[in-house]
């Protein structure tokens, strides 16, 4: 059973989604405001946060930024629109995935389980080092210049996927399928934002990346040039 913090101001949506997720086997704490959600998360950190973006008071974008600044708990955001500006802003604030309302609870449950699977141990592997970047695939840890690099499950899974085949170009569609487990492969925003956040953590100069290179029109390649 996973502990889920649901932050949603719409009463009907909050109650309906909390009830359904409980039936799917999750232990759900539901709150109506960003302030209350932050307080409950500080008291008893959830394993995953389902967060509505359009909240009264502190909005979902700010809640997302504060939760992300405090740790690496996965965040699935709920947005009432599929507009690029909302989705991109939410991803830039630190969300790992998103769903557009109205949405069936089974879809939210599927996204929750997909995100949580990213935190599961990777297949047996090896410790690999590229310069001062060290990836321990068995321990699921990353260090840079001898210091641990804190990563969300999505960021770590993306790095593990890219670094599994150094020099090989992986398309955005491949990464969406293997990292995010998305059946709809048209949303490259998840991949591009994930790479952007990953570069900010492992690159000396994210604007001139050494470890993760963009292959224009196709995808990304891992390996120092």
Image (cartoon, rainbow, N blue to C red):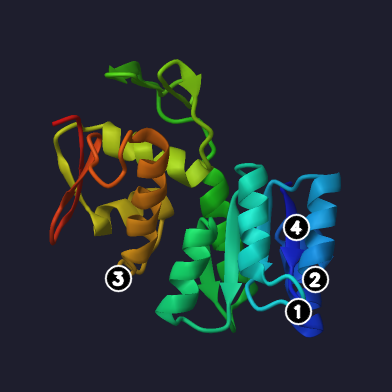
Is there CB contact under 8 Å for labels 1 and 3?
A: no
Q: Dot 3 surroundings within 10 Å: few (below 14), some, or many (20 or more)?
A: few
User: In the shown orientation, is residue 100 left or right of residue 71?
Assistant: left
Residue tagged 3: 186
Q: Dot 2 surroundings within 10 Å: few (below 14), some, or many (20 or more)?
A: many
Q: Dot 1 surroundings within 10 Å: few (below 14), some, or many (20 or more)?
A: few
The residue under the point 65% across, 69% down is 60
Residue tagged 1: 56
Q: In which quarter of the image is residue 129?
A: top left
Q: Distance between the residues labelled 3 and 4?
A: 29 Å
Q: Distance between the residues labelled 1 and 2?
A: 7 Å
Residue tagged 4: 5
Is there CB contact under 8 Å for labels 1 and 2?
A: yes
Location of residue 12 with respect to 175 vertically, above or below: below
For the residues carrying marks 2 and 4, which lies nearer the camera in this image?
Answer: 2
> Looking at the image, which is closer to me, 197 or 5?
197
Location of residue 7 with respect to 157 vertically, above or below: below
> Looking at the image, which is closer to me, 114 or 73?
73
Residue tagged 2: 33
Is there CB contact under 8 Å for labels 3 and 2?
A: no
Q: Which of marks 1 and 3 is nearer the N terminus?
A: 1
Locate residue 152, reporting x and y percent: 53, 42
Q: Which of marks 2 and 4 is nearer the N terminus?
A: 4
Locate residue 194, reporting x and y percent: 39, 52
Counting labels gives: 4
């Amino acid at each position: 059973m996973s502990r889920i913090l649901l932050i949603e101001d719409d009463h009907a949506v909050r109650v309906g989604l909390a009830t359904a997720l409980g039936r799917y086997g999750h232990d759900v704490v539901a709150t109506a405001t960003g302030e209350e959600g932050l307080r409950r998360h500080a008291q008893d950190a959830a394993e995953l946060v389902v967060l509505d973006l359009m909240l009264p008071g502190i909005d979902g974008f700010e809640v997302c930024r504060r939760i992300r600044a405090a740790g690496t708990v996965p965040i699935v955001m709920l947005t009432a629109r599929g507009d690029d500006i909302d989705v991109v802003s939410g991803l830039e604030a630190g969300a790992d995935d998103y769903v557009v309302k109205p949405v069936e609870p089974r879809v939210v449950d599927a996204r929750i389980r997909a995100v949580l699977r990213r935190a599961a141990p990777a297949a047996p592997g090896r410790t690999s080092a590229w310069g001062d970047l060290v990836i321990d695939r068995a321990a699921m840890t990353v260090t840079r210049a001898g210091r641990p690099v804190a990563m969300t499950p999505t960021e770590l899974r993306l790095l593990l996927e890219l670094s599994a085949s150094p020099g090989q170009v992986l398309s955005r569609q491949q990464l969406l399928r293997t990292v995010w487990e998305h059946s709809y492969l048209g949303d490259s925003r998840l991949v591009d934002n994930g790479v952007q956040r990953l570069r900010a953590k492992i690159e000396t100069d994210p604007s001139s990346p050494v470890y993760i290179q963009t292959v224009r029109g196709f995808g990304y390649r891992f390996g120092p040039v």
